Image (cartoon, grey):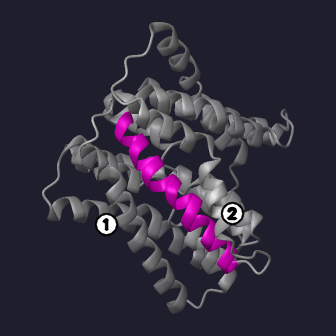
Amino acid sequence: MENFLLIFVALSAGYLIQKLRLFPENAATTLNQFIITVAFPAIILLQVPKIDFSYEMLLPAFIAWIVMFFSALLVLLLSRLLHFSKEITGALMLVAVLTNSSFLGIPIINAYLGSEAIGYVLVYDQLGTFLAFAIYGTFVASYYSSEHKLEFKLILTKLFTFPPFIALLVAFMLTGTAFHPAIISTLEALSATIVPLALVAVGLQLQFRLPKDDFKPFGAALFVKLLFAPFVAILFCWIFGLESLAAQVSILEAGMAPMITAGVLASMAGLAPRLSASIVGYGILASFVTTGILYLYIVG
């Protein structure tokens, strides 16, 4: 209950700050930069070295890619059937495919499944969602935007200069290492900031304006992201008889809201910025209901 109260209070605080204009316009960007460069690497360095990398541990990353692959195929199919423009198709290829596996995934899964699930969350996020964002996301933004030229050098540069990915590589090399208590205490203090700051940043970026012309792509995006994606994860786990904590985390992650930074990337690439922001905003609120239903399915 305490975790859900924190989610509600932090999101509400961010939204009110946005509406009352109490922070500078770039406040959300500043908070996200701190999370990405300090807090998120801290939690990676704290949690990943503890992980015993087995097939079970890598399962979330595999499921993440399966879910994103079929979600992208469905977006392409719906875009063709519903005659969406190239701009809208590109936007949906980002916000309807990439999931909010860390900023919302960490607090929500921690609330439902406990801190022992965070290691699986990090694997799903770093080896699944983040790699997709860096590689797939850059490709989509370049391909669907007339303003961007596809450069694979940019993809590699983005990947190997991203602080959480650097932290992940370091954490892999430190697997099994016992840290000094002072280091553990420092990492714990820094990583503890990720949840409240991330949620406030989400609140600062929430947008709820939705013109009538956007109803079809809006509905298609939320259908793919909040209903179809977790269904793919559930079906995969059912076919292979997977019921472990790793499988449970993967199902919940698949049903998370659209990735906020995917919406930012879509806007920067000129891919239906207003629609992308609305999908992210409404998707965050709707995901609290859908993840709750998924949790009831998991424990039932």
Residue 298 % position (x, y): 23, 47
In the picture as drawn, the residue positioned furthest to the front comes out as 173
Q: Residue at x 61, y 86 (%)?
A: 84
The residue sitting at 40% across, 50% down in the picture is: 253
In contact (CB < 8 Å): disc 1 and disc 2: no
Q: Amino acid at mark 2?
A: Leu
Label number found at residue 232: 1
Q: Secondary structure at mark 1?
A: helix
Q: Height in image: 47 above or below 74?
A: above
Q: Which residue is mark 2?
A: 154
- Left/right placement of residue 2 relative to residue 237 reads right
Is residue 257 placed above or below 7 in the rendered structure? below
Which of the two residues, 136 or 99, is positioned nearer the viewer here?
A: 136
Please tell me how crowded label 1 is: few (under 14), some (14-19), or many (20+) other residues with Cα within 10 Å.
many
Q: Which residues are magenta?
A: 118-144
Judging from the image, what secondary structure is the residue with disc 2 in?
helix
Q: Is residue 166 left or right of residue 224?
A: right
Counting other residues with Cα less than 10 Å from the Cα at mark 2, is it few (<14), some (14-19), or many (20 or more)? few
Which residue is drawn at the image coordinates 32% and 33% (left, top)?
Answer: 51
> Residue 128 is drawn in which quadrant?
bottom left
- Residue 282 appears in which quarter of the rendering? bottom right
Residue 130 drawn in magenta: yes
